[in-house]
Image (spheres, grey):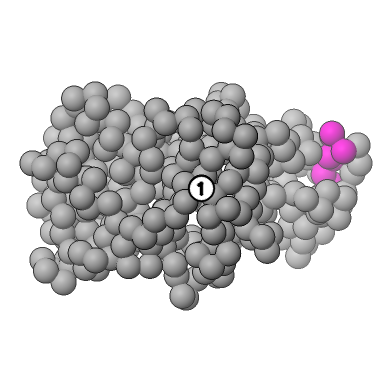
């Protein structure tokens, strides 16, 4: 996982300058309930560079913040492309986006950020489920252009629900396995992962069940596994239970704002920060999206998110303030 403090393209909560208004140039129907959006600078300028695996956050007209993987060609600085699955049972973000973020509108965009970077490897095995294909598409474009050794297995409910099938097949007819469930049944993950050998980087994105099954099969295997830890890229993310210990009160100094707030049991740091910084960004508020990530200047954070790696937790340089707490009586945050 990329350390945010090492990535100059990343701006953390409250810092603001990587937010920009982009124009929705066009939308394209990619599959059942999936549209892609082409977002461009209204003045025709170039957008910040990004690498495969990156995502952007869209601040919707209602104020909801949703994250979507970039799925266009990374070399294209003239615009960003994201694809969004409409989820009737979601929390409203994808519905709002499908209905209101239309060509000609502007939308506030933050990022790009990359928590799913493509590492150098002798061979790549991509496993995508449903709308989880979006970050994988950008990766496949990259490895295909580099002439790397790669294979993709792409599962979905039915062929009509699977976005970007034609583009993927064009990128590697012999390397792409399209597996609609209504034609071929469930993915045979044992057979898929048997293709992985030492030196293979396995990248998986899709529903939680697919990720868990792939993780289980890769445990102890010689390949390196990389997953995007949420319900479905391009879709609204699935809530995970977060066990937050809320027995102590502590203080949080907001260094840039120049004030101190108290965080009692039953309130989150995010709640307390919002008392004085109402615009503090968040999305899932359950510790799995990364929107509220904030730099820690002093003190020892107690992490309750499902994003940071063990190494990042030990370093204690950033935290998710929607669920994190403090091990010290005072935390100093870069807010
Ligand atoms: Fe999603 Fe905090 S808002 S991790």
Q: Is residue 286 left or right of residue 259?
A: left
Residue 285 visible here: no
Which stretch did the figure color magenta? 250-257
Residue bearing the label numbered 1: 25
Count all numbered tags in the image, as a single digit: 1
Q: Is residue 55 left or right of residue 63?
A: left
Depth check, front residue: 254 or 242: 254
Residue at x 74% of width, y 31% of height? 297
Depth check, front residue: 243 or 56: 56
Where disc 1 sits, the SS reads: strand
Residue 80 visible here: yes
Query: Residue 175, how many percent across, how many down?
Result: 12, 41
Depth check, front residue: 117 or 103: 103
Pick the quarter of the image with the N terminus.
Answer: top left
Residue at x 62% of width, y 34% of height? 43
Residue at x 91% of width, y 41% of height? 259
């Amino acid at each position: 996982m990329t350390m945010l403090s090492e990535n100059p393209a990343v701006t953390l909560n409250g810092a603001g300058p990587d937010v920009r208004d982009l124009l929705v140039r066009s939308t394209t129907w990619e599959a059942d309930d999936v549209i892609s959006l082409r977002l461009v600078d209204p003045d025709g300028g170039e957008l910040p560079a990004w690498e495969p695996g990156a995502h952007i956050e869209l601040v919707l007209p209602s104020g909801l913040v949703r994250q979507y993987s970039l799925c266009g060609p990374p070399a294209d600085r003239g615009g960003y492309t994201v694809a969004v699955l409409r989820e009737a049972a979601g929390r409203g973000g994808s519905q709002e986006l499908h209905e209101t973020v239309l060509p000609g509108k502007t939308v506030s965009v933050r990022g790009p950020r990359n928590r799913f970077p493509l590492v150098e490897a002798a061979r790549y095995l991509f496993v995508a489920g449903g709308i989880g294909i979006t970050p994988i598409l950008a990766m496949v474009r990259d490895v295909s252009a580099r002439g790397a050794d790669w294979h993709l297995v792409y599962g979905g409910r039915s062929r009509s629900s699977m976005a970007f099938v034609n583009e993927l097949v064009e990128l590697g007819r012999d390397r792409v396995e399209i597996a609609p469930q209504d034609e071929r049944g469930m993915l045979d993950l044992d057979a898929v992962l048997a293709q992985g050998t030492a030196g293979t980087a396995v990248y998986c994105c899709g529903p939680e069940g697919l990720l868990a099954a792939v993780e289980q099969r890769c445990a102890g295997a010689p390949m390196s596994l990389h997953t995007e830890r949420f319900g479905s890229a391009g879709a609204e993310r699935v809530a995970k239970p977060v066990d937050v210990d809320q027995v102590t009160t502590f203080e949080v100094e907001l260094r840039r704002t120049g004030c101190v707030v108290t965080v009692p049991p039953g309130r989150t740091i995010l709640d307390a920060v919002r008392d004085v910084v109402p615009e503090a960004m968040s999305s899932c508020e359950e510790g799995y999206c990364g929107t509220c990530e904030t730099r820690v200047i002093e003190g020892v954070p107690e992490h309750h998110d499902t994003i940071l790696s063990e190494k990042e937790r030990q370093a204690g340089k950033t935290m998710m303030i929607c669920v994190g707490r403090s091990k010290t009586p005072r935390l100093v945050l870069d807010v």
